[in-house]
Image: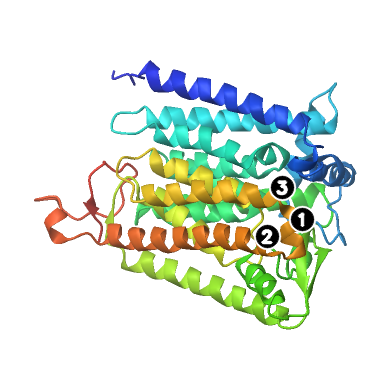
Amino acid sequence: MNRLRVTPGPVLTVTAMWLITRALMLWLIAHSGARPLGGGSVTREVWRLYFHWYGVLAHGSFPAHDSLWQYPPGAGAVLLAPGLLPGLTYFQAFVLLTLAVDALTTAALVRAGTRPGRSPLGAALWTGGLPLLLHLPLARYDAQVTALAVLSLLAAGRSPRAGGVLGALGAVVKVWPALVLLGTPRGRPTRTAWTWAAGTSAACLAVFAAFFTHPLSFLREQGGRGVQIESLGGTALNLARHAGWPGRSRYRYGAIELMGPHVHAVATASLVLTAAAFGLLVLWRVRARHWSAATPYDAALSAVLLFTVTSRVISPQYMIWLVGLAAVCLTSRHTSQRPVAALVLAACALSTVAYPLNYHEVVRGTWTGCLLMLGRNGLLTAAAVLSFARLWRAARPPAAKSVPGAEPRAGSGRLPGRVLSVS
């Protein structure tokens, strides 16, 4: 029986990095009331908003008629979980559970990266990249959602069934993890993963409908969202202020949105661009003929990047998703997304300069705030375009790079490191 041999060097290095960086993040969260760190705005969402929703959920109902509740029913399970830890405040329990999920994600990336032919860079990117967002990852439940997406991708290569289940659980919590199944190899792996994902989603929704009232109330609030100040459209409108646009910013639907002439047109344009991005991804899926071991990972990162940059809302916590997916890509030596991962890290650093460090400048629409968001969103847009271009090229490599004598095949649960022809 072959045993997996783990090189202790990378494991010890990542472990030391994780302990040091997470201690720093905990220190930051303990001092989050300081003005440079946002004056408590980062942590307020947990102890005020999440805790309020916890009280509603604990009585067997989702927050119906609450304009701030815009999440699928699975989010309720995540927000109820801190109540399972006795002797701690809700805030303390939430941070502790988030830290535990972070550790689980790191361990999964380390395990994947230390397999033969794989790379520990993914675990290093997650460990070192997340602190670029300061203490924000510990004060949002996006780390839990990202963990489900990461585990889904890492599991799918060996068990499409497990990948489908984990992807569905992530989608029930925050929708976007459904995109991680886009790159599953054709044939049986795709049928298995998507069938189990559909079944898991249906089962979860049935459970929530049986034990809670109003499980689908979030749909009504999602449709009413406008243009958040940090989105691409919001950045354009903020710049338009300096050219005389009479709009203003206002707290609405849990975010700072822009109000005024042409906002509806910008929101519609964002939806059209999202539809176009989906069309491009479908076209890639139809036209792709070659899969490598990294293709499912690369497709997931590319898809989430495209949906992120075309969104009406690009909140700072969205960067957690991108760091996690970029980390999965870097566990494979065959990924096409290395330069994209570098752009994601740069966008994370600039995102932190904008929020929480200079968010008042962004909200006021000053030149400093506008340029910060223009830089962050410019990096994300460049990453999305580059990611999809490299994904497209990798799926249709030159004939000279094909494996000599390899027979086309469509659907193996396990893909070797080399490129395979898929008919």
Is disc 3 surrounded by few (<14), some (14 to 19) or many (20+) residues within 10 Å?
A: many
Does residue 394 lie above or below 88 as drawn? below
Q: Please state if 62 lies on the left or on the right of 330 as rendered.
A: right
Which is nearer the eye, 334 or 207? 334
Does residue 31 lie above or below 249 as drawn? above
Q: Residue at x 83, y 33 (%)?
A: 90
Return the residue at label 3: 356
Quarter where residue 253 is shown: bottom right
CA distance for labels 3 and 1: 9 Å
Q: Secondary structure at mark 2?
A: helix
Q: Please state if 269 lies on the left or on the right of 158 as rendered.
A: right
Residue 349: percent from left, percent from top: 57, 46
- At label 3, the amino acid type is Pro
Residue occupying the far left of the picture:
405
Where's the N terminus, which quadrant?
Answer: top left
Eye-nearest disc, 3 or 1: 1
Q: Secondary structure at mark 3?
A: helix
Return the residue at label 2: 369
| Mark nearer the N terminus (1 vs 2) | 1
Whether residue 156 is visible here, answered yes or no, is no
Q: Residue at x 52, y 30 (%)?
A: 106
Determine which of the numbered discs, if any, sits on residue 250 in the image.
none
Residue 371: percent from left, percent from top: 61, 62
Determine which of the numbered discs, if any, sits on residue 360 in the image.
1
Marks 1 & 2, CB-CB < 8 Å contact: yes
- At label 2, the amino acid type is Gly
Q: Residue at x 78, y 76 (%)?
A: 247
Is disc 1 surrounded by few (<14), some (14 to 19) or many (20+) residues within 10 Å?
A: some
| Mark nearer the N terminus (3 vs 2) | 3
**Number of on-image labels:** 3
